[in-house]
Image (cartoon, rainbow, N blue to C red):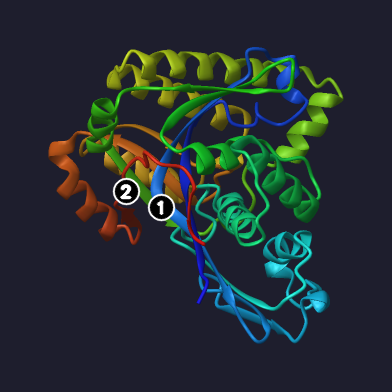
């Protein structure tokens, strides 16, 4: 029986996020976004079926139709992205599509975009539709933009497609420039200092990129200045990773977090502040909330010798320490 499987890594954003939304990057050149792909993945499996069947394991939802022409997200709004992607390939025969994600709900690790990449790659393989890596990014990004109905940036899709640690820069010609950052040996050292903590599902929206987008286009000076600071932090982070200086990476990570928190106080919560306060007493020395904040995941840089004590402390705070490593591979597709 024919089966196609794919998987793609999520990411931890390190600096420059929101600079990757077109056309905002044109106003802040060089508009760099820096992230690391991690071994917390989304997966897709496609197989033949007597019905069109879509199973989202992480959401515990199953949708079934007798004919692929009948696919609709009106009954299953939480599956809209998945169903839009399937329908965009115009299936004429029934298939079963299974989706799963390691990322906790509202993690801030780019989970929905990574699902979009994993599923698009699997569907392209199933339907013999060749996509380059750049085309894969654009295809998944376009369908998710249709789903959420506001402009989206590039970094979540790029981390999922290319893996590793990269700086992503959008040029004036609209082409994406990738700069790999750090050797694999440095990645292993960075992993020793990395501790990812899931604080819990966000109680409210953190950064609203659409609001930032509108205010920037309207010429809000505070927002324009804020984006200039994000650009500066991203350039410094790129340099710190290129020079493989963990202390410098930590310094810029803290600087970027303070920049965002000062402008966007809803990124943090009392729970996050308590986590940072307590872990910094026990061996953490830098931190940044992932994604939009307001909950989700926090990336800590720590003294590796204090890892066990920090994990114990985090458990006592009813939070989850998530083991993870840098993913040296981007999206992978297997099957005929």
Q: Which of the 4 image quadrants contains residue 41? A: bottom left
Q: Position of residue 172 (x, y in %)?
A: 73, 15
- Residue closest to the eye, 194 or 46: 46
Using residue 301 as the reference point, say whether residue 68 is left or right of it: right
- Residue closest to the eye, 116 or 314: 116
Q: Secondary structure at mark 2?
A: loop
Using residue 90 as the reference point, say whether residue 285 is left or right of it: left
Residue 271 seen by the camera:
yes
Query: Mark 2 or mark 1, which is nearer the start of the sequence?
Result: 1
Q: Is the Cβ of the residue at disc 1 closer than 8 Å to that at disc 2?
A: yes
Using residue 69 as the reference point, say whether residue 79 is left or right of it: left
Residue at 62% in and 28% down = 263
Q: Which residue is mark 2?
A: 324
Residue 284 seen by the camera:
no
Q: Position of residue 155 (x, y in %)?
A: 58, 35
Mark 1 and mark 2: Cα distance apart in space? 7 Å
Residue at 38% in and 15% down = 242
Q: Position of residue 247 (x, y in %)?
A: 29, 19
Residue at 75% in and 29% down = 22
Q: Secondary structure at mark 1?
A: strand
Q: Residues within 10 Å of mark 2 (few under 14, many from 20)?
A: few
Q: Which of the 4 image quadrants contains residue 59? A: bottom right
Q: From the viewer's perspective, is residue 29 above or below residue 217? A: above
Q: From the viewer's perspective, is residue 88 above or below residue 237? A: below
- Residue closest to the eye, 226 or 17: 17
Q: Which residue is mark 1?
A: 40
Q: From the viewer's perspective, is residue 21 above or below residue 46? A: above
Residue at 69% in and 78% down = 94
Residue that sits furthest to the left in the current view: 305
């Amino acid at each position: 029986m024919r089966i196609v499987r794919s998987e793609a890594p999520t990411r931890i954003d390190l600096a420059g996020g929101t600079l990757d939304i077109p056309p905002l990057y044109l106003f802040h050149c060089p508009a760099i976004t820096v992230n690391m792909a991690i071994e917390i993945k989304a997966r897709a499996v496609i197989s033949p079926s007597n019905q069109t069947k879509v199973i989202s394991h992480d959401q515990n939802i199953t949708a079934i139709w007798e004919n692929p022409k009948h696919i609709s997200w009106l009954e299953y709004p939480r599956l809209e992205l998945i169903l839009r992607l399937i329908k965009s390939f115009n299936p004429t025969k029934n298939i079963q599509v299974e989706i799963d994600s390691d990322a906790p709900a509202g993690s801030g690790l780019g989970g929905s975009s990574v699902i979009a990449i994993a599923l698009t790659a699997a569907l392209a393989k199933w339907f013999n539709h060749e996509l380059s890596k750049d085309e894969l990014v654009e295809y998944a990004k376009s369908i998710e933009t249709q789903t959420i109905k506001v402009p989206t940036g590039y970094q979540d899709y790029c981390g999922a497609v290319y893996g590793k640690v990269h700086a992503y820069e959008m040029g004036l010609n609209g082409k994406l420039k990738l700069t790999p950052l750090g050797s694999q040996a440095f990645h292993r050292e960075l992993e020793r200092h990395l501790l990812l903590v899931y604080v819990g599902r966000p109680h409210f929206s953190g950064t609203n990129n659409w609001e930032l987008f509108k205010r920037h286009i309207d010429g809000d000076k505070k927002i324009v200045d804020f984006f200039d600071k994000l650009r500066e932090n991203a350039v410094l982070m790129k340099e710190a990773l290129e020079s493989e200086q963990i202390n410098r990476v930590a310094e810029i990570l803290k600087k970027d977090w303070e920049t965002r928190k000062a402008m966007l106080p809803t990124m943090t919560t009392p729970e996050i502040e308590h986590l940072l306060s307590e872990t910094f007493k026990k061996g953490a020395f830098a931190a940044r909330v992932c994604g939009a904040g307001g909950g989700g995941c926090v990336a800590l840089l720590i003294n590796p010798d204090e890892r066990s004590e920090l994990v114990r402390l985090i458990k006592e705070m009813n939070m989850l320490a998530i083991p993870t490593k840098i993913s040296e591979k981007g999206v992978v597709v297997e099957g005929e």
